[in-house]
């Protein structure tokens, strides 16, 4: 009897997994259709927990304004904290403000600075991550938590393995990022688990001017296009 129940349970899971493919396909189709119409964008990542009075929230606003003024749209995860600051800066500059929202049981809600026609909702993290990588001309990474690191290392891995075109990855905040980069260089690079060229496109900066200069310098010799 227990064996029959066990097989029945697995069959139900397989059926549910099969039907889930249609929802996954729907999220991809909707995302590709909307994002392909937006044009060159830069994604800004960072903690959802950062408060408005925090210096990095205020810096994210200024960085996003400068990115928008340079002619790029701004993409964020659509939620509060640094994401809100990024959309807010783009909005203040009159630029394109995109939010890729994820359905979470806590902490995530749409911020009010996303363009009404550029707010996309996702149930699947992996679909959402594809949109960030495919339609970004650069990643600007503010201080954040595990989700921020996940996006950062996914982009580095995809570039390292030639699965996507190279684009600039800019870490904002030397006091936050220097320890991590010192460990990567002092431990990973020293042990030979990565090569020096893997780090070529990663820059650490502290100002909005540096962010825009890096992006503009990179694209002087490159065309803006989706990354795969």
Image: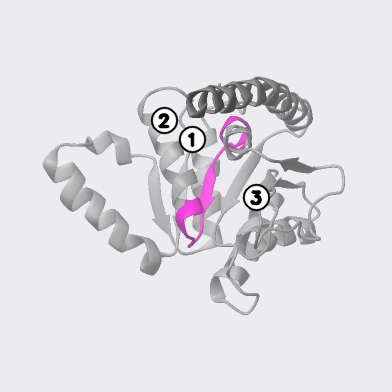
Front in this rendered view, residue 62 or 127: 127
Residue 122 against residue 130 in the figure, above or below: below
Answer with mark 2 or mark 1, whichever residue precedes in sequence.
2
Check contact, mark 2 vs mark 1: CB within 8 A: yes
**Which sits in the foreground, 52 or 27?**
27
Per the image, the residue denoted by label 3 is: 77
Q: Report, in whole angstroms, how far the alpha carbon at label 3 lies from the one at label 2.
A: 21 Å
Judged from this view, the residue extending furthest toward the bottom is 53
Residue 83: x and y in percent read 64, 58
Quarter of the image for residue 37 reads: top right
As drawn, is 59 to the left or to the right of 92? left
* Left or right of 95 on screen, residue 210: left
Q: CA distance from mark 2 to mark 1?
A: 8 Å
Q: Residue at x 31, y 41 (%)?
A: 199
Residue 159, position in %: x, y?
Answer: 41, 30
Secondary structure type for disc 2: helix
Q: Quadrant of residue 41?
A: top right
Q: Reading the chain from its start, which is encountered first: label 1 or label 3?
A: 3
Residue at (70% x, 52% y) in the render: 78
Residue 163, percent from left and from top? 45, 22
Task: Check if residue 145 falls in the magenta segment.
Answer: yes
The residue singled out by tag 2 in the image is: 159
Query: How busy is the neighbourhood of tag 1: few (under 14 within 10 Å), some, or many (20 plus)?
Result: many
At 59% from the left and 30% from the top, the residue drawn is: 134
The answer, for residue 221, to whether it is visible in the render is: yes
Kindly give the residue lying farthest to the left in the view shown.
191
Q: Magenta segment, which residues?
A: 132-148
Whether residue 54 appears in magenta in the rendering, the answer is no
Q: Up-down: is 42 above or below 172?
A: above
């Amino acid at each position: 009897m227990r064996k029959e129940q066990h097989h029945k349970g697995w069959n139900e899971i397989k059926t549910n997994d099969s039907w889930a493919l249609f929802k996954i396909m729907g999220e991809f189709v909707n995302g590709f259709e909307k994002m392909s119409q937006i044009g060159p964008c830069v994604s800004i990542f960072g903690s959802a927990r950062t408060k408005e009075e925090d210096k990095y929230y205020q810096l994210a606003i200024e960085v996003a304004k400068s990115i928008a003024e340079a002619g790029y749209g701004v993409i964020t995860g659509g939620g509060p904290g640094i994401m809100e600051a990024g959309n807010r800066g783009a909005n203040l500059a009159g630029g394109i403000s995109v939010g890729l929202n994820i359905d979470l049981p806590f902490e995530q809600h749409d911020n009010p600075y996303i363009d009404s026609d550029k707010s996309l909702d996702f149930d699947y993290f992996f679909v959402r991550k594809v949109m960030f990588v495919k339609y970004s001309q650069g990643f600007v990474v503010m201080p954040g938590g595990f989700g921020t690191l996940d996006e950062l290392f996914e982009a580095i891995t995809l570039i390292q393995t030639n699965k996507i075109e190279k684009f600039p990855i800019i870490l904002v905040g030397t006091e936050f990022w220097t320890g991590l980069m010192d460990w990567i260089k002092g431990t990973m690079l020293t042990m030979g688990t990565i090569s020096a060229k893997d780090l070529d496109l990663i820059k650490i900066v502290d100002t909005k001017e540096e962010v825009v200069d890096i992006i503009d310098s990179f694209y002087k010799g490159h065309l803006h296009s989706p990354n795969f």
